[in-house]
Structure formats: structure tokens, C-alpha cells
Amino acid sequence: MSDINELIEQIGGRERMEAMAANILECHAIAHSDVKAMARALLVVLDARPDFYIHRVERCDSYGPEVELRVFNSQLDASKCRDDHGGEIIEAYTTPPADSVPDGWKLVPVEPTIEMISAAREWAYGEYSRPVGNDAAKGFWVALTAAAPAPGGH
């Protein structure tokens, strides 16, 4: 992971990537949506953790060269094995990165925040000149998110 960390540092570090992903910085040379997508993808890589560790040792005996692999669930156990037998530790990732949000979609909470409820109430009053209570605003949100299709669905 050191190569990706060096790349991130060359373009301003993790804080700058988070600011790009959160739409705080303006970038004029690259399309805005592309910058946000790149930042999100790189943040996923930065946050990835190995699922297991492989201790790899090359040996040579009377039958010729061979490679011995041992799998460990913890980095500590793999490090102890390396200290005892030499070789190297390989970090193994099996979990695919989280999907990015498709264009035209937005991640939202399942339960509305108080700010979202207030915005819905203000919109209803402005649009129809009729007040809507918190329970009604929250009920609309719950109904809408329950009926929303998954990305790629209908």
C-alpha cells in the first residue's frame, strides 16, 4: 500500500482527497464528476484492510527450489513466523471495494434527519401553502425510500 500512499501524498494527501470527494474543492482541469469519482475510489483503497496474511518462504533442498506458503488471520502471527523463518509477508485482500454511487443517484439515510424533515415541511408549505407536520414529512420519506429501486433496478 505504500505506493498508493505516496501517490495520495503527491496530490495533496488524504484530507485533500476527502475534500474533493465531499465537493469542497473546485477543480477546473478535470470534470467535476470525474474528480469526485477518483477521490471516492482512492478513499476506498486507502480504507481497505487485508483479509488475511500469507507468509512466503523460498527454500532449496536436494529436490530443488520450492516455495512454502502459510496463511494467517493476523498480521502479528504472520510477523512472528517471518521472524522465525525469514521470508516475506503478503497482504491478501478478498473483499471487493464498495461500489461507487452511480451518476444520477445519491446516498441518503434510511431515517430522515431533522434537517431533512424541516426541508420537507418548508417545501410543502412553499409549494402548497399548507403546513405539514414532522410525522407526515417523516412518513413521506419512509414511503419514498422503501419504494426506491436499487441502482440498476427498475
Image: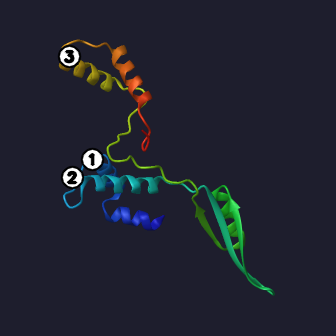
The label on residue 141 is none
Q: Is residue 13 above or below residue 82?
A: above
Q: Give the mark nearest the N terminus, 3 or 1.
A: 1
> How far is the residue under mark 3 from the one under mark 1?
32 Å
Quarter of the image where one finds residue 50: bottom right
Which residue occupies the extreme right position in the image?
Answer: 62
Q: Is residue 86 left or right of residue 137?
A: right
Q: Identify which amino acid the numbered label 1 is placed on.
A: Asn
Q: Position of residue 143 (x, y in %)?
A: 41, 23
Q: CA distance from mark 2 to mark 1?
A: 7 Å
Q: Is disc 1 surrounded by few (<14), some (14 to 19) or many (20+) residues within 10 Å?
A: some
User: Which residue lies at the image location 35% right of the left edge and 15% below the top edge?
Assistant: 136
In the rendered image, residue 40, in percent from the top left (x then y), is placed at 38, 52
Position in image of residue 52 (x %, y %): 63, 57
Disc 2 residue type? Glu
Nearest the camera: 7 or 76? 7
Query: Please, is residue 20 above or below residue 115 in the view?
Result: below
Q: Which residue is at a point 42% across and 64% down the rendered structure image?
A: 4
Give the residue at x 28% y 52%. 33
Q: Which residue is mark 1?
A: 23
Query: Is label 2 or label 3 in front?
Result: 3
Query: Rounded to the nearest whole Å, what is the CA distance between mark 2 and mark 3?
Result: 36 Å
Counting residues from the start of the chain, the first of labels 2 and 3 encountered is: 2
Instruction: Count residues near mark 2 (Cα–Cα under 10 Å), then give few for <14, some for 14-19, many for 20+.
Output: few
Residue in the picture at 33% in, 65% down: 10
Residue bearing the label numbered 3: 128
Relative to 65, 94 lies left or right:
left
User: Mark 1 and mark 3 in contact (Cβ < 8 Å)?
Assistant: no
On screen, residue 33 versus residue 129, left or right, reads right
Q: Secondary structure at mark 2?
A: loop
Q: Which residue is situated farthest in the front direction here? A: 154
Q: Which residue is mark 2?
A: 26
